[in-house]
Image (cartoon, grey):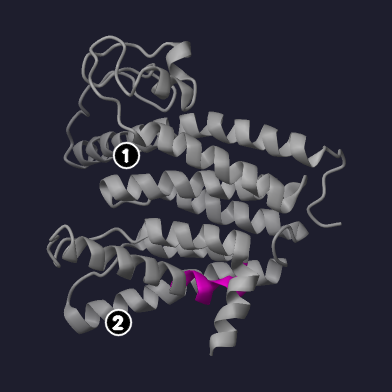
Amino acid sequence: MPGALTVDLDPTTFTVIAGVLGLLVGSFLNVVIHRLPRIMEREWRAHCAELRGEAPAEHERFSLARPRSQCPDCGHAITAIENVPVLSWIFLRGRCSACAKPISPRYPLVEATSGLLCAFAALHFGYGWAAAGAMLLIWCLIALTWIDLDTQLLPDSITLPLLWAGLLFNVSGSFVDLQSAVIGAAGGYLSLWLVYWAFKLTTGKEGMGYGDFKLLAALGAWLGWQMLPLTILLSSMLGAVVGITLIVVIKRGRSVPIPFGPYLAAAGILALFWGKPLTRAYIGLL
């Protein structure tokens, strides 16, 4: 059977293991969300200095692994007991143990989202490669969502490996057949690329970034071309609802750009779990 592993696990046990794993990886995702844009910025500055013939600025070693996580206000190094997903934030009442400055609720939110979605993936797909692939896709989409919200960037270092991973998982048909995955990757990129150029030629402005093309291409590689119309529809609806709400309620200016990546990611997760019934319901309405 496509997507099946050779060892079986009790569904409840597998769901619990997946949920705990999701919490632990969610803690690492917080590091990725915070540090990856800064790593990219340092690399860009070093490249620019090299092009100008200058020596790159000296910096303390900075990567996803080093230095240890610390409070951004007082520099207090986060201990192991203070780094337990969700529970540590609750125990510390959302404040640094050294300086009592608030710790953003984003950290437990990312961890809890990762844990819950991974547990649901295990429950939905059962023990097999499909569940493993779904969890990998979920982790990448969570990281991309928050990075895009912070910086309006969708790093190639996540979107491109995600695209290739989707094709590799579908070699054995974990989600769709390989042909559908390849067409989905090409169709996902080209569909938003065409929208981008149509908007730019009409208005003279850029309506979205190239990272959005790559993200939709990655979703097409994972879910197949059949899910592209639904993904585009759902992401557009979510973006419209949130955009109108921000304009009407928060009085956000119409000219302020809104990142599209989070809506693509949310639509991708909806399509991952409920793509076929949602597509049938949509076609039924037509």
| CA gap, disc 1 and disc 2 | 29 Å
Amino acid found under the numbered disc labelled 2? Ala
Q: Which secondary structure is most common in the magenta stretch?
A: helix
Q: Nearer the viewer, residue 265 or 68?
A: 265
Q: Is residue 92 left or right of residue 188?
A: left
Q: Is residue 21 left or right of residue 172?
A: left
Query: Which residue is depicted at the point 41% across and 48% down?
Result: 144
Query: Which residue is depicted at the point 63% across and 50% down?
Result: 134
Q: Position of residue 172 (x, y in %)?
A: 77, 58
Instruction: State the quadrant of the N terminus.
Output: bottom right
Image: 18 above or below 204: above
- Residue range in magenta is 224-232
Kindly check if marks 1 and 2 are in contact, taking CB atoms under 8 A apart as contact. no
Quadrant of the rendered image containing residue 164: bottom right
The earlier-in-sequence mark between 1 and 2 is 1
Query: Which residue is depicted at the point 49% across and 26% down?
Result: 85
Disc 2 designates what residue? 198
Amino acid found under the numbered disc labelled 1? Pro
Q: Position of residue 192 (x, y in %)?
A: 40, 72
Disc 1 designates what residue? 37
Residue sticking out furthest to the bottom: 286
Asked whether the viewer can see residue 183, the reply is: no
